[in-house]
Amino acid sequence: MVTFTHGGNIEELRTHLENLGLTLGETEERLIKEKSERLIMWREDGELVGHTIWHASNTKQHPNGEPREQDDRHILEDELGIEGDFIELHEIWLADTYRGRGYGSAFFNYFEDMVREKGYDSIVYYADHPAAMSICMKRGYKQAFGVELDGITGERSRYYVLAKEL
C-alpha cells in the first residue's frame, strides 16, 4: 500500500532521482526549499517510490510575481475556464516498477482532498505522460494543448494543460 507524506528530506529525493537517471531542477528545488510541504513523498513499506511537487498559483501571474504568458493565460481562462487562484500540480513522478498498481488513482484521491482542505477549488497540471493524462481524464479533468515547457528530463516539449474544478 502506498502512503503520502508532506515534506521530507530533499537529499533523499535528490538521490532517488539520480538513481533513476534524473536530476532535481532548480525551480523544483526552490519550490521545496521555500515551503517543504510542497513536496509529497510516495512510499511503499517505507521505500521512496515516487514524489509530487505542488504550489499555489494564479491565472494572472506566476508564484514569483512574474506575469503569466498570454498563451498560457488564454488556455487557463478561456479554454479551461479557470479564473484566479488555483493549485498547480507541478510534477508527479512514480518509478516505472510501481506503475499499474493504482498508486496514481490513490494519489489523486489524496491530492484533491488536500486541495479542498486548503480552500482551493481548482487544480491545474501541465502533463505530457500518457498515463498521467489518462488518470486525469478519467477523473474529469478538462484538457487543452499548447504550452512548451522544460520537463523533468530537461528536454523542452509540448505539454497538455489539464484542469479540474473541484
Image: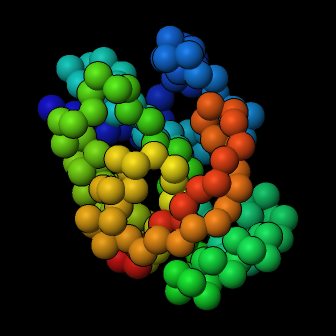
Of 147 and 103, nearer the camera is 147
Q: Residue at x 46, y 71 (%)?
A: 143
Of 148 and 61, nearer the camera is 148
- Residue 116: name its quadrant: bottom left
Q: Is residue 157 visible?
A: yes
Q: Is residue 9 left or right of residue 113?
A: right
Residue 92 in picture, x, y percent from top left: 46, 42
Q: Is residue 110 visible?
A: no
Q: Is residue 1 left or right of residue 129?
A: left
Q: Is residue 115 above or below residue 35?
A: below
Q: Is residue 102 above or below residue 66?
A: above
Colouring used for the render: rainbow
Residue 157 in picture, x, y percent from top left: 66, 47
Residue 25 in picture, x, y percent from top left: 69, 32
- Residue 22: name its quadrant: top right
Of 109 and 69, nearer the camera is 69
Of 116 and 73, nearer the camera is 73
Q: Residue at x 67, y 62 (%)?
A: 147
Image quarter in which the N terminus is found = top left
Residue 33 in picture, x, y percent from top left: 66, 36
Q: Residue at x 53, y 20 (%)?
A: 17
Q: Is residue 48 above or below residue 157?
A: above
Count the labels in the image: 0
Image quarter in which the C terminus is found = bottom left
Q: Is residue 107 above or below residue 136?
A: above
Q: Residue at x 64, y 54 (%)?
A: 158
Q: Is residue 48 left or right of residue 156?
A: left
